[in-house]
Amino acid sequence: MGKLDVLINNAGIVPGGAVESLTDDALELVLATNVTAPIALTRDLLPLLLAAQPSRVVNVGSMFGDIAFPLFAAIRRRNSACAAFPTRCGANFAIAASA
């Protein structure tokens, strides 16, 4: 088995529009792409990250998660979720993580 020194989670989508116009499918796609995928990828690559300690996980976010922009409410919760995960990952596995 190999090792992985750095994992950069950079995929993301930003649906624009009023919350009331977003379909369930659109919201599920946002969560699957922006939250579930980086967490699942980190989980799946964890053995390689642990083999390379000290390894790094970098989750790239967006300023939309920190500032209340009109018509971009769906993206705000994504950044909160992804910001919490690497902190927990790092605490549990001695992997340096940042969001």
Image (cartoon, helix red, strand yellow):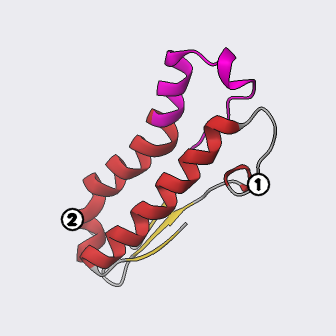
Label 2, label 1: how far apart the Cα atoms are? 35 Å
Quadrant holding the C terminus:
bottom right
Magenta-colored stretch includes residue 30: yes
**Residue 59 placed where, x, y %?**
53, 60
Magenta-colored stretch includes residue 64: no
Label ID, residue 47: 2
Amino acid, disc 2: Pro
Horizontally, residue 32 falls left or right of residue 46, namely right
Please tell me whether residue 97 is drawn above or below residue 9 in the rendered image: below
**Residue 40 placed where, x, y %?**
32, 47
Q: Circle 1 sits on which residue?
A: 67
Amino acid, disc 1: Ile
Name the residue furthest front. 20
The region drawn magenta spans 10-31
Q: Residue at x 45, y 63 (%)?
A: 84
Q: Which picture quadrant has residue 15?
A: top right
Quadrant holding the N terminus:
bottom left
Please tell me whether residue 99 is drawn above or below residue 44 in the rendered image: below
Q: Is residue 35 visible?
A: yes
**Residue 29 placed where, x, y %?**
50, 27
**Mark 1 Cα shell of 10 Å, populated few (<14), some (14-19), many (≥20):** few
Mark 2 or mark 1: name the one nearer the start of the chain: 2
